[in-house]
Image (cartoon, helix red, strand yellow):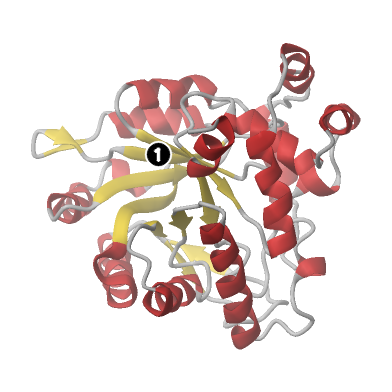
Amino acid sequence: MLPAQRSVQRLGLGLAALGRPAYINVGRAAVLPVQRTAQAMRERTRTVLDAAYANGIRWVDTARSYGSAEQFLADWLRERGHQDVAVSSKWGYAYVAQWRIETEVHEVKEHSVERLRTQWAETRTLLGDRIDLYQVHSLTTSSPLFDDLALQHELARIRDAGVQLGFSTSGAAQGETIERAWEIEVGGRQLFSAVQSTWNTLEPSASRFLAEAHTGGWRVLVKETLANGRLAVDPPAELTRVADRHGVGTDAIALAHVLRQPWADVVLVGAASVEQLESNLAASRVELTERDLDALSRLARDAATYWGERAELPWH
C-alpha cells in the first residue's frame, strides 16, 4: 500500500460543521448553502459523505449535539448500504438552538446518568448497532463523572454490550483529564479504551499524554486539526511558507503535521464542502521534511492562550 493510501485510511470525517446551521469553524459559512435549511444541510452532508467515502475515508464522527448530524448520517448509511464505515458518536451536550443561527445558547452540557440514558437511547434509535465508539463529550477534570459511580456503571453496561467507550477533551488541561480517565476501572478493567483530543500545530500540549494512551492500547482520535479553520483561513506566515514549498494549501500542511504523529490513529477533518475536503486530502501526499517540522514546531502557542482565543470564536 502506498504511503498516501495509508494516510487516507487514518483520516475520518467529523460532522460538527455539517449537522447544524451554526458552528464556530472559521471559513465555513462562505461555502455553505445560502439558505441553511435542514434539507439543504442534509443534502450537503450527503454530498460530503459521498466524496469522503469515494476517497477512501471509512470513519465518521458525530455527536448528539451536532444538530441533526446523527439523523443525516443514519439516512446516508441506509441509502448507500455501506457496511465498512466505522461510526463514533458522543453524549453529554444537548443541542438547544432549534435550528437558529442567531441564538444566545446553542448547546447545553450535562454529564449525568439521566442525560446518558436519554441520549444513548436516541443514538441507538437512529444508528442502531452501527456505533463502534461512544464517547463522553468534552470530559474535563471538573466533570462529575469522576465521582459518580452510578454514571460509571451505566457506561460500563454499554461497554459490556460490546461498544467501545471513549471521551473527548477540551481546554488547557487535556493531559490531566486523560491521566485521570486512564485510572477509572469498572468491573476489573478500564472503563475507557479511546480518547479524542484537540491537537494541532498551534496546540500540541497533549502530545505526551496521547502518545502514552496510544502505547497503552487506547485508540487515539485527533479533533480540531485545523484549529477550527484558523490554520486554513488565517494561517501564520511560516505555515504559508511551508505550504508554498509543497504546492498545497496550509490546511494540507496542518493535517500532514498531525498525520506525522505516530500515536494519531484517526485524524478528523471537518470539511463543510467537497472543495474543502479535496484540499484537506492533499495532506496524504505531503512528506514533511525536518526543516518543515522544525518550522511548524515553533508555531505552538501557550495552551491557555490558545483556548482563550478559541473561546472567543463566534457561532455563525
Give amino acid for label 1.
Answer: Val
Residue 25 in view in this figure: no
Q: On the image, numbered disc 1 is attached to which residue?
A: 195
* Residue 229, position as x, y percentages in the image: 74, 50
Residue shown at the point (40%, 31%) measured from the top left: 178
When the figure is inspected, residue 36 is found, relative to residue 182, above or below; the finding is below
Outermost left residue: 187
Residue 35, relative to residue 45: is it above or below? below
Residue 184 in percent (x, y) is at: 24, 34
Tell me which residue sits at (30%, 54%) in the image: 132
Which of these two is toward me, 142 or 44? 44
| Number of numbered discs visible in the structure rendering | 1
Q: Locate residue 18: give its quadrant.
A: bottom right
Point out residue 305 in the picture as x, y percentages from the top left corner: 73, 33
- Image position of 86 (left or right of 302): left
In the displayed structure, would residue 198 be above or below residue 137?
above
142 or 217, which is in the foreground?
217
Asked if 50 appears above or below 71 in the picture, the reply is above
Residue sitting farthest toward the front: 1
Asked whether the viewer can see residue 185, the reply is yes
Badge 1 density bin: few <14, some 14–19, many ≥20, Cα 10 Å: many
Circle 1 — which element?
A: strand
Q: Residue at x 25, y 61 (%)?
A: 113
* Residue at 47%, 33% in the rendered image: 1
Q: Quadrant of residue 292?
A: top right
Residue in front for this viewpoint, 2 or 52: 2
Which quadrant is the C terminus positioned in? bottom right
Position of residue 66 measured from the top left corner of the image (x, y, whole percent): 52, 67
